[in-house]
Image (tube, rainbow, N blue to C red):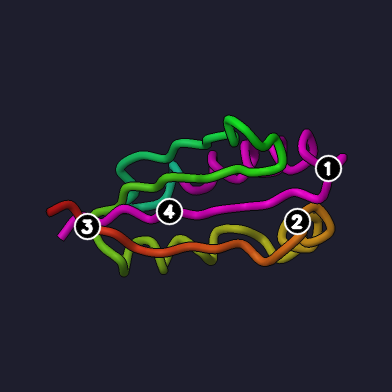
């Protein structure tokens, strides 16, 4: 069953541009993953430190398999950019 994954990110103040660039760079890796239908990066309307990625997948297993596509060295670059751990959840249309 198709699913939607919502991911939320909160940049450290002053790191917004760096986090945006990082998220844009990993979207390419996500889009090319088997089972990915679409990926959209959103910036907070009222809070420039907030970002969200909306992912559409054919199923949860496809999303979980794609997580390994992001190299550990990229994840190491990510950690200093965020003020708190990212949040994410799966949703399905009703």
Q: Residues within 10 Å of mark 3 (few under 14, many from 20)?
A: few
Tell me the distance, in whole angstroms, between the alpha carbons under discs 2 and 4. 17 Å
- CB atoms at circles 1 and 2 under 8 Å apart? yes
Percent position of residue 59, x then y: 25, 61
Would you name the residue on which mark 1 appears? 15
Q: Which mark is residue 6?
A: 4
- Mark 2 or mark 3: name the one nearer the start of the chain: 2
Instruction: Left or right? Give the position of 15 relative to 58.
Output: right
Q: Earlier in the sequence, mark 4 or mark 3?
A: 4
Q: Specify few, some or many for label 1: CA neighbours under 10 Å numbering under 14, 14-19, or 20 or more.
A: some
Identify the mark nearer the N-term, 1 or 2: 1
To which residue does mark 3 refer?
92
Say whether disc 1 or disc 4 marks the residue closer to the N-terminus.
4
Instruction: Residue 36: say if magenta.
Output: no
**Chain part drawn in magenta:** 1-30
Q: Position of residue 31 (x, y in %)?
A: 44, 42
Mark with earlier residue (2, 4): 4
- Residue 78, picture quadrant: bottom right
Q: Secondary structure at mark 1?
A: loop
Quarter of the image for the C terminus: give it.
Answer: bottom left
């Amino acid at each position: 069953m198709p699913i939607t994954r919502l991911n939320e990110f909160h940049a450290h103040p002053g790191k917004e541009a760096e986090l945006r660039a990082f998220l844009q760079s990993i979207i390419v890796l996500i889009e090319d993953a088997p089972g990915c239908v679409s990926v959209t990066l959103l910036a907070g309307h009222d809070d420039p430190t907030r970002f969200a990625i909306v992912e559409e997948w054919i199923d949860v297993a496809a999303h979980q398999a794609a997580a390994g596509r992001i190299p550990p060295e990229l994840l190491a670059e990510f950690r200093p950019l965020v003020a708190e751990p990212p949040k994410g959840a799966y949703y399905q249309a009703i």
